[in-house]
Amino acid sequence: MKSSLMKSRIFTLIALGLLLYFFVIPAVFTHDVVELAREGKVDKIPPIAYKVWNYYVKGQYVSPNTPKDAVGDLKKMIDEDAELSAVSAPIWYVALEAPNYPKKAFPNGIPVYYHFDGFSGDVHEMNTINHFIGMDPMERGAPYLRALAPYALVLVALLMVYYMLYNWKILDWLMWIPVVLPVIFLGFYAYWLYWFGHHMHAWGAFKIKPFMPTVFGDGKVAQFTTHSYPTIGFWILLAIAFFSLLAIVSKRKARRLAQQTV
């Protein structure tokens, strides 16, 4: 019994570590940074947000439009009025190839990355293309979900802590939340793609009928080619789901063994 219980705690700890490092810490400490900078309220950005943002932005996609001397430095990015991004682990990747964007500057098309708490990549360029076909800007998608994401992630992290410390049966059921996180993300992602594709506007220079954008794989929209695939954050979510499931199985086994010895 003790062995199974210890395994459950170890599996939960691994899942918690992944969640904290890749999602909770960057999402919480850089919460509202993009919005505050956009609204000119830079003085309200706490000092720690600069350090966390600069640390987590390393290794992320850098737009060719970003001033080279400002790359990786939040203060310089704000001073240069450069496009800011979310720095939690990106979960899904979409790239769009357009005839007017040269391969040399954009070898993989116009990329944007979807996070729990925002976007990264060439969001401005993607919004320009969206406007061209009469589609809303990306920021219209899931505004309340993105705003609440840091708080929701903290709650999931607290759930994992409680699961390690207590043996309440109800926690077994609640631990299914991190198990199904990848499915939850995909569900919301697919819904908002549908929403964007079915709320077209007359302002578009190129008129197209309502459509369902490609959720996974390659697709075609008018004269544009699209690519939609999971990226590092999604695989991390799968790892969190895997270890959370192992934690549930191990704790239930420990509980059964305890009942047999009574």
Image: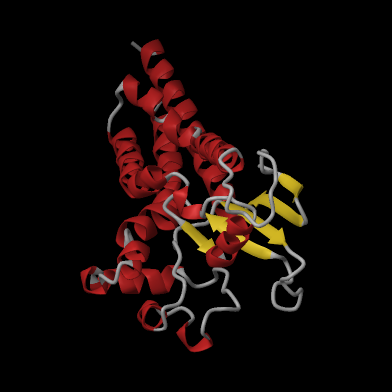
Q: At which x and y percent is residue 57?
A: 47, 70
Q: Nearer the viewer, residue 178 or 224?
A: 224
Q: Is residue 143 above or below residue 37?
A: above
Q: Residue furthest bottom?
A: 69
| Quadrant of the drawing holding the N terminus | top left
Q: Position of residue 83 (x, y in %)?
A: 47, 72
**Residue under the image location 45 percent in, 77 percent down:** 82
- Quarter of the figure that contains the C terminus: top left
Please name the colour scheme applied to the rendered image: secondary structure
Question: Which residue is painted at 34% across and 42% down in the image?
Answer: 152
Against 124, residue 167 (above or below) is above
Residue sitting at x 46%, y 78%: 72
Can you tell which quarter of the image residue 225 is in? bottom right
- Looking at the image, residue 105 sits to the left or right of residue 78; the answer is right
Residue 47 position, x and y percent, is 25, 73
Q: Judge by depth and name the residue closer to the eye, 131 or 242.
A: 131
